[in-house]
Image (spheres, grey):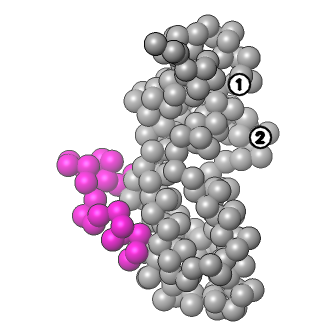
Amino acid sequence: MHQKPARVRIVDAAHELMLSIGLARATTKEIAKAADCSEAALYKYFANKEELFVTVLSERLPKLGPLLSELSKEPGAKSVEENLTEIAREAALFYEQTFPMAASLYAEPQLKRRHEEALREMGTGPHRPIQGLDAYLRSEQDAGRVSRDADTYAAASLLLGACAQRAFAYDMAPDRKPPQPLDEFAAGLARTLLTGIA
């Protein structure tokens, strides 16, 4: 049987461990062991665990960042409601997977600070999707499809905050199931937000 390349095995192992035991407990040593390589081999591909985390986010999770970037450049291909529904759907899936990964950091303030500093140095962090959605909504304002009076940053925060809250709230529910299917939630959220900013 042909083994996957080391980098792929490392990212796969990091994704699995970050989902199952959380970012704080997924050490580079554990990740290397799960990837069937040495810790030194891991560091040939990734400078630190934070860089590996960002790679997992961009390569293994729903593509929220690229979707927002693409829509900001070409907002008019679909209706605003269709675009917001797609964004809400991807955001809900993205937060559903990142919440269990990142939640463990809040139990270890020193590790959380180090993680945040590393993300800042890489020019990324949890604020980036809000900025991306804000940029998309401003492009829709420029195209005349969103009201000039709309507070696009507040609208972006509301939509993404609702998606993050869905992941947080129902991860802790007894049956872990939200009351609405994802597609229904995304469409309702987009429609409701659009009522306020159209």
Q: Is residue 190 left or right of residue 117?
A: left
Residue at the spot 71% in from the left edge and 22% down from the top edge = 45
Boundaries of the magenta span? 168-188
Give the secondary structure at mark 1: loop
Q: Residue furthest front?
A: 1
> Local crowd at mark 2 within 10 Å, few (<14), some, or many (≥20)?
few
Which one is in front, 88 or 82? 82
User: Separation of disc 2 and disc 1 at Cα?
Assistant: 13 Å
Label 2 or label 1, whichever lies nearer to me, is 1
Q: Is residue 123 left or right of residue 147?
A: right
> Local crowd at mark 1 within 10 Å, few (<14), some, or many (≥20)?
some
Which one is in front, 138 or 86? 86
Q: Where's the C terminus, which quadrant? A: bottom right
Q: Is residue 146 left or right of residue 90?
A: right
Where is residue 166 shown, x and y percent of the image? Answer: 38, 59
Residue at the spot 69% in from the left edge and 9% down from the top edge = 40
| Label pair 2/1, CB-CB below 8 angstroms | no
Magenta-colored stretch includes residue 85: no
- Mark 1: which amino acid? Phe
Q: Is residue 82 left or right of residue 151?
A: left
* Residue 170 shows in the view: yes
Where is residue 19 shown, x and y percent of the image? Answer: 44, 34
Q: Which residue is mark 1?
A: 46
Residue at the spot 61% in from the left edge and 74% down from the top edge = 154
For residue 153, which quarter of the picture? Answer: bottom right
Against 48, residue 34 (above or below) is above
- Mark 2: which amino acid? Met
Give the secondary structure at mark 2: loop
Q: Which residue is mark 2?
A: 122
Which one is in front, 5 or 99? 5
